Amino acid sequence: MSPAHRSSRLSRLRRVTYGQQLFGLATIPLVLAAAAIALLVNIQSSRMAERELAALERTLIETKKEELKNYLSLARTAFVTIYGNAAPDDALAKLRVTQILSAMVYGQDGFFFVYDYDGTNLVSPRQTRLIGRNWTGMTDANGVPVTDTLIDVARSGGGYHTYEWEKPSTGETATMITYVIGLQDWQWAIGTGVFIDDVLTSVAAARAETQSRVRRTFVQIGLITGAALTIVFLSGLFITVRERRLADAKLKALTQRVLDTQEEERGRVARELHDSISQILVGVRYKLELAKRLTSKGGAGATKAVDEGIEGLQGAIGEVRRISRDLRPGVLDDLGLGPALKALAEDFSARTKVPVNFQTVVFRNRLDAEAKNALYRIAQEALTNIERHAEATEVSVSVAGHRNGATLRIADNGKGLTAGRDQTVARTGRSGLGLRNMQERVEQLDGTLRVTTTDAGTVIEADVPLSHLLAPQAGRDGTGKRAKGLSL
């Protein structure tokens, strides 16, 4: 594949159609909005879930702590009489209390423990290997002090302590919360604990469920976005197909109207040639043949016949000029719209004997060629309709500029299009071919055409926007001086 062919192929691949651009403009904001919504939902859901999980964990742990207090309160009730009646060195009383506490086990892992303030374990019914040994300085797997902290808490009156400890039922290490109080007379730290791995498991399960809900929400948002994109795509496809069909129908209708207009113009020119120039030239031929015969016979009327033939040729030349001017007036390009309309009005008045009141205002800026041609053709079409159908006795034509552009106004006192009815061509589909041609010319300029018809006559107004007025510098000649005769 040659570089030129490859470049051409890449250029075709990179070319984006109007439908693709429209689909992109419709889908990109939707995708971005869906992504933003999903991100916002994720952030808010995660934050809310974390707050709820933290509150749940706190609630469950507080419940565990209250249970520990209740357990220790029950144990104290069991030995408070013995402790209260014993002396600080009553060994028998201490033995009885240790026996009571050793027997008070609950659940699979619940038990009471006792350390003296020197760090020696006195009671550990589920882990007897600890009894009788000094555990000062003992820490858990994370380096958290165990014995020393328990003794300090007991000395201060009691409280909670959390650390990692081996579960008697499984032998695995888990997080344990203990509540400890002190028997100050005996220098003992008595406490019990509860493992909170079930709490952590519940919180982890709740967190997993929350994350699962967030993922489901993501999927739902994705499905909704996909459905919306599908609807947008199908709607765009439907609109594109519909608009293309309408455009094809309009194009066919426009093509047919162009052909009809061409045929009508050709017929008009043919009629002009046949009815005027052809008849004049036939008359000239007869005059020249007569002059030839008179000359060959030596008749005295040959000169008169030649003069009449010359006069006929002059008329034919005038007709050719008139037809040419109707097809494309040279004065429109040379002098502007104002003189061209004035000449058109004078020709109309001379041909129909209907007086035409023509008014114009010289513009500082000239109309561009497209606007001049359109307004001239509108005026030409309007005068033709007046001549054929209006039966008017007075006609007025005016063209002037204003701050919004330029306006052409043609009015007559004829019988009107539909007596007693006002209409705007832009809003009616029942106008004739001439009015449709006017409307299309104005629409090409982004202007407006208004047709008002009453019993008193018809008024046609064509407005051209300011964008079709040339800038001031466009009206100057090459030397920078303002050109003479600037007008529409």
Image (cartoon, grey):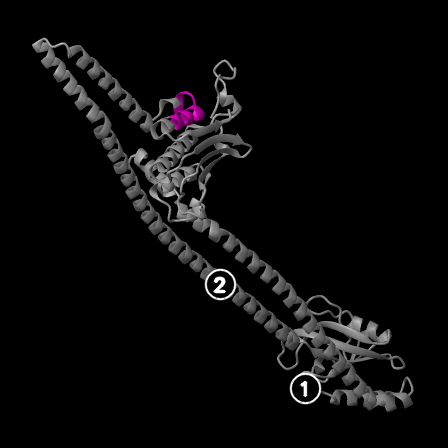
Residue 104 seen by the camera: yes
Residue drawn 29% across the image and 38% down it: 261
The quadrant in which residue 199 appears is bottom right
Q: Above or below — where is 128 with respect to 277?
A: below
Where is 316 relative to 101, above or below? above
**Quadrant position of the N terminus in the picture:** top left
Residue type for callout 1: Gly
- The answer to whether one can see residue 164 in this image is no
Residue at image x 35%, y 47%? 247
Is 13 in front, or is 295? 295
Q: Can you give x and y, in whole percent of width and height, for residue 424 in the image? A: 45, 45
In front of the other: 95 or 315: 315
Query: Where does the magenta region start and end?
Result: 332-346
Q: Secondary structure at mark 2?
A: helix
Q: Is residue 186 magenta?
A: no
The disc at residue 107 is 1
